[in-house]
Image (spheres, coloured by chain):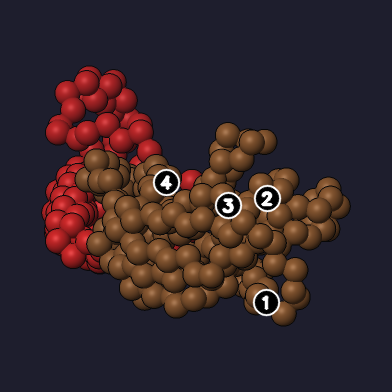
Chain colours: A brown, B red
């Protein structure tokens, strides 16, 4: 401590230690938080098409097409340890081929400070709803919204929101090409 | 440790160094605690960080420059001994005045 640099060095090291302790305090203060919430999901006009899946095995698989109506308020989830949320909408269903199928149809990143009251009316799904096979007709599908909490200091948690809905696909294929809008793809 | 020869004096006494170190530790911990509480109230971790950084600024201003309060207890050096009084000098050396052992560079006392 007998020169500028020596004192500055000691001060800096002590500051870093204090910041580390405070960050641990933030982690401990939100350790038991569960980050639950309720959303409303609506599946609009689901149809099934039978097409060649060029991105997979070139066989003809079932393609589900639907529009989504979503409504959610995420403000209660942002406490001081949450940096951003990764939302994703999952469609789950059962087929004779697989006990559980899960397909992500839509996702979004919501950062702290951005608009957290989201409302979408009949938007197209972001990703294609391909089935691994041809079992979508008359299938009961459950749509649920999940979020992944990205913290300042802490665990990465996946939480399923309350308010999932189910719908049933029709039992006939749509063969007309003008019937449905295409999914919007990745943004 | 990088050693730079500043054109001005940068030393502090040992007692001054102890005061300075205790002072910045207290200041930074104090601002850290205030920042933690404010951040928890507002649910904004950035407030905590800003509070600590403000504390660092205050501490840096108060403890890094060698203010005169840190030079109130200068090290007392013994008087230099002539080579003629060598025999007496050895006996006198064993009874030291209250000078702490300085194992770093021995700077002579500067007139201020």
> Is mark 3 in CB contact (under 8 Å) with mark 4?
no
- The mark nearer the N terminus, 2 or 3, is 2
Say which of marks 2 and 3 sits in front.
Answer: 3
Which residue is under mark 4? Answer: A158
Q: Are dots 1 and 2 on a single chain? A: yes
Q: Nearer the viewer, mark 1 or mark 2?
A: 1
To the question of a shared chain for discs 2 and 3, the answer is: yes
The earlier-in-sequence mark between 1 and 2 is: 2
Identify the element where label 4 is drawn: strand
Q: CA distance from mark 2 to mark 3?
A: 13 Å
Q: CA distance from mark 4 to mark 1?
A: 36 Å
In front of the other: B12 or A103: A103
Residue bearing mark 1: A179
Find residue B23 and report its horizontal and vertical position in percent. 17, 52
Label 2 belongs to which residue? A131
Sequence order check: which comes first, mark 4 or mark 2? 2
Q: Residue at x 56, y 49 (%)?
A: A139
Q: Split into 4 quadrants, where in the image is the C terminus of chain B? A: bottom left
Q: Residue furthest right?
A: A58
The residue identified by callout 3 is A138
Instruction: Give whichever of discs 3 and 4 has the lower sequence position.
Output: 3
Q: Closer to the observer: label 4 or label 1? A: 1
State yes or no: discs 1 and 2 in contact (Cβ < 8 Å): no
């Amino acid at each position: 401590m007998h020169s500028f640099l020596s004192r500055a060095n000691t001060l800096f090291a002590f500051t870093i230690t204090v910041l580390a302790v405070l960050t641990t305090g933030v982690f401990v203060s939100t350790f038991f938080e569960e980050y639950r919430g309720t959303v409303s999901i609506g599946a609009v006009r689901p149809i099934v098409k039978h097409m060649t899946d060029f991105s997979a095995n070139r066989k003809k698989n079932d393609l589900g097409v639907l529009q989504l109506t979503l409504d959610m308020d995420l403000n209660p989830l942002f406490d001081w340890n949450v940096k951003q949320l990764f939302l994703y909408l999952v469609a789950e269903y059962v087929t004779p081929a697989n006990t559980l199928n899960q397909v992500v149809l839509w996702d979004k990143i919501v950062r702290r400070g951005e608009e957290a009251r989201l409302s979408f009316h009949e938007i197209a799904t972001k990703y294609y709803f391909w089935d691994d096979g041809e079992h979508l007709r008359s299938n009961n599908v459950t749509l649920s919204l999940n979020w992944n909490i990205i913290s300042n200091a802490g665990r990465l948690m996946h939480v399923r929101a309350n308010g999932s809905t189910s719908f049933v696909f029709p039992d006939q294929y749509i063969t007309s090409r003008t019937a449905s809008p295409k999914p919007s793809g990745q943004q | 440790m990088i050693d730079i020869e500043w054109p001005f004096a940068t030393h502090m006494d040992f007692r001054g160094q102890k005061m300075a170190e205790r002072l910045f530790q207290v200041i930074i911990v104090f601002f850290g605690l205030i920042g933690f509480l404010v951040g928890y109230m507002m649910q904004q971790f950035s407030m905590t960080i800003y509070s600590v950084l403000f504390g660092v600024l205050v501490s840096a201003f108060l403890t890094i420059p060698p203010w005169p309060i840190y030079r109130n207890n200068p090290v007392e050096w013994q008087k230099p001994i002539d080579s003629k009084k060598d025999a007496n000098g050895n006996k006198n050396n064993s009874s030291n005045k209250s000078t702490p052992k300085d194992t770093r560079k021995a700077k002579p006392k500067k007139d201020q």
